[in-house]
Amino acid sequence: MGKVLNLEDLKEIKAKAVSLLATRGVCADPLVKVVNGKADVLICGGTGCVASSSRDVREALVTEIKKQGLQEEVRVILTGCHGFCAKGPLVVVYPQEILYCQVKVSDAPRIVSETIVNKQIIEDLIYKDPQSQEQFPVYHEIPFYRNQLRLSLRNCGLINPEDIREYIARNGYIALGTVLEQMKPQEVIEIIKDSGLRGRGGAGFTTGIKWEITQRSPAKPKYLVCNADEGDPGAFMDRSILEGDPHSVIEGMIIAGYAIGADAGYIYCRAEYPLAIQRIKIALSQAYEYGFLGKNILGSNFSFDIYLREGAGAFVCGEETALLASVEGRRGEPRPRPPFPSIAGLWSKPTNVNNVKTYGLVPQIILHGADWFRSFGTKNSPGTATFALTGKINNIGLIEVPMGITLREIIYDLGGGIPKGKAFKAVQTGGPLGGCLPTEALDTPVDFDSLVQAGATMGSGGMIVVDEDTCMVEFAKYFLTFASAESCGKCVPCRIGGRRLLEVLTRISNGEGKPEDLDEIEYISNNMKEASLCALGQLTPGPVMASLRFFRPEYEAHIYEKKCPAKVCKGLITYRVIEENCTGCMVCKRNCPANAISGEKREVHYIDPNICERCGICIEVCKFDAILIE
Amino acid sequence: MNEAIEEQNFDLKPLLEVLEEYKHQKGAVIPILQRTQEIYGYLPKPILKEISKRMRIPISRLQGVATFYAQFHLKRRGRHLIRVCDGTACHVKGATKLVDVIEENLEVPAGGSSPDYKYSLEIVYCVGSCGLAPVVIVDDRVMGQAEPDKLVRQLKRIED
C-alpha cells in the first residue's frame, strides 16, 4: 500500500473498503448489497474474553469452517471489546446479528452448521434476561445495548482493530483529510470549543480551551500527549477503546496536533495492558504506511509523529505532570501547577494532555459538527459518558450512555440490577479517588457537575456497585490502602496523611475505634485536600469523606457499639452455630483451617471464638444453614 | 554470593543495539531500561553503569528511575516465581512449613533466588483463595491445598 495522496484518494479507498463491512449491515451505502451466503463471525478479542479463551474459540471456528468448506463465504474476525464482559467469550454472527454468550470451543461445530449454514438460532447460547427470563437473540435488542448511545465505542466490537481498512470504511481518517484540506487550525479549535467537549480523564476541563491555550503559547516545538495510563482498579474504558478502535485515538491526536501546531505526540499507556500496546503498535505502523503519520500527511504541509511510551508500574503517572516527568525519562513525581502543561509541559514546551476518550471523540465531532455533539447529553456536559460497570451488578461490562442519564437508569436498566435479589447500597464513581453515593442519590443525573455536587466525581469512568453485604468502612479502607500505597512520597500531606488515615480506619474496622476518630478523619482529610501537591493526594480522602458523609451511622456502630452492621469486619464479628439447625455432620469441623470447631458426630458443634480466624469457610461448606455471623 | 555475579561478564551487544535504536529519541530512559530488563531479566549494576556512561546520564538518576517504578528489578530473579500465601487462613494451614521445605529442598531463600536461578521465592499476603488454603502460586498457576512433599516434587518437576 502506497501513501494516501489526498482526501479524494482517501474517499476512493473508503469506497472500496466498505465492502469489507457489507455483511455487518453497518454501511449506509446502498450500493453495497449483502452477497448471498456470505457471513462474518465476530469474536471478541478484548482482554476479558481473551482471558476466557476466546482465542481458542476462534481457532475452533476457523477449523470448523474449513472442514465444512465455507472459508470463501465466511470470515472469522477477532474484534475489540464488545463491553458485555460478564457473558464472554462473545460471538456475533452476521448478517443476522445474533449474539452468542459464553461460547465454548465445543460449540463451534453447532454454530457453523446450525446458525451459519441453516440460519437457525441456538437457543442455549443466546442471552436471557436474568430477571424476566426473556430471550434476546439479536445483539442490538439486548437491554444492555438497547439503552446505550455508543459514540466513543461505536467501532468497538464491530470492526477488526488490526485492519485499518475497516476503520476507513467507517469514515476513518476522513475527518483528518477534511481538516488538512479545508480547515485552518483555528477553525478546528473553534469547532471543538463550540462542541463543548470536556476532557474525559476526570477533571472535565473544556478541551477546546485547553487546545487554544497550548496553540497560543509562544514557545516551540509543541507536543501532544495521550494519557492512557488508566490505573484505577475496576476501570477498563480506555483499554477497551485502544484494543477495539485504536485508529480513532490516533486520528484524534493527529487532528489535535494540527490544530495546536505540534510536531510530535506521545501515547503513554500502562505496561499492564499488553494487548492494547500491541494493537497501538499495529495501528501506528498502518497509519505510517498509509501516510496519515510522518512527513506531509495526505499531501499537506503538516508533518506529525506519534511515539508509544509504556508505563512502568506507577499509578501516580496518571497525573499529568507526573506522566510528563515519566515521558522525559525521570521519576514519575508530580510538580506544582501552574505552570500548566499547556504553557510548560514536556521539556518545558507547551504540551496538550488529553485522555484516550477525549481524542477518540474528536474525529466524529469534526465530521458531524459541534451541534451534532451538543444534541447529546446536557448543556454543560454534552456528549456521552463511558463507564466500566463492575461490582455487585448483573451486567458487568463496558457501557456508553448520554450524559444526564440517572444513576438509577444505569444500574437497573443497563446493569440489570443487583444479583441474588440483594439490596443496592452504594455506587462508587471515580475509582479510588472518587466517592460513593447512597440510595437517596440514585436519581442524580450523571454529568461532570451533578456528580461533584452530589458528593462524588465523574473520574475517568469506573463505576463500582456494592450491595447490602458490603461494609462501607471496609470499602473505604480498601480504596485508601490502594491510594496510599501509590503515593509517590514527594509531598508530606499525601505521604503521611494517607498513612495516618489508613491507621484510623484500620483501628475502626478492628473494633478499636475511639469517639474522636471521626473528627480525626475529617481533620486529616481536609488537610490532605488543601495541601497535597497533586490530585492523587487531594483526592485520596475522597472515598472516606463520601462514605462518612452518607454512611456515618455505620462508622458510629463500629466505634460505639463495636458492631459491623454488614458483618464484614473481622474484628467485630463472631461465627456461631445455630443449635437447632446443626446435624453434627462434622463437615465444618473437617474444613476449618484453624481447628476452631469442636463437637462429636451427630452432636451440636461449637465454634471457639478465640481460635476462629473468621475466614468463612464453615458457612460455605455447611449444607444446613447452621452457622451465622453476629 | 552476589559479588561473583556482579563481576560476571555480560554480553553488551544486545544492549548496544538498544542504545543505538533510541539514540535519537529524547528522554527514552524508561524504554531503554525496559528493553534492558527484557534482555538480562533484571537491571544489573554493571549494565546500569554502562548505560550511564554511554548516555551521559548520572548513575544516580538511573538508579532513581529504576527504584521508582514497580516494574524494575535490581536483583537477578529466578526463571520461575514461587509465591507462598501467608495470609491468615494459609498461615494456620501450614504456610510456614511450606516455606521451610521450599527453602531447604530447592535452596531458595524467601525473598531471594536459588543459586542456579531456576526459582525465586516470595511470601505474599492473602491472595483471596482461602478456601484452597494453603495456597502456592507458581508463575501464574494457583496450587491449592498444597502439601509439603508433593509441592516440592511438583516444583522440582517444573521444566526450565
Image (cartoon, helix red, strand yellow):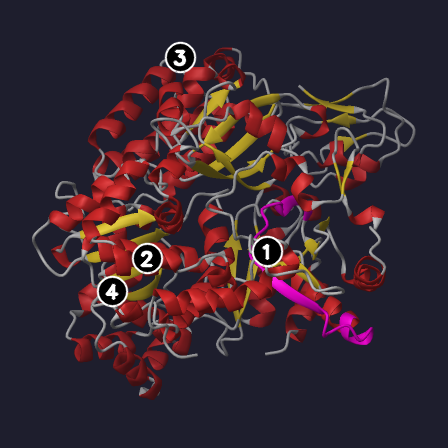
Q: Gap in Å between the C-alphas at discs 1 and 4?
A: 61 Å
Residue A520 covered by magenta stretch: no
Q: Residue at x 65, y 50 (%)?
A: B94
- In this rendering, the label closer to the viewer, 3 or 2: 2
Q: Answer yes or no: is residue B35 visible.
A: yes
Q: Which residues are magenta?
A: A65-87
Q: Amino acid at mark 1?
A: Pro
Q: Residue at x 31, y 66 (%)?
A: A307
Q: Amino acid at mark 2?
A: Thr
Residue designated by label 4: B63
- Horizontal arrangement in the rendering, residue A570 relative to residue A225 (left or right): right
Tell me which numbered mark, 3 or 2, is placed earlier along the sequence: 2
Q: Position of residue A305 (x, y in %)?
A: 27, 67
The vertical placement of A240 against A625, above or below, is below
- Nearer the observer, A194 or A587: A194
Q: Gap in Å between the C-alphas at discs 3 and 4?
A: 45 Å
Residue designated by label 3: A515
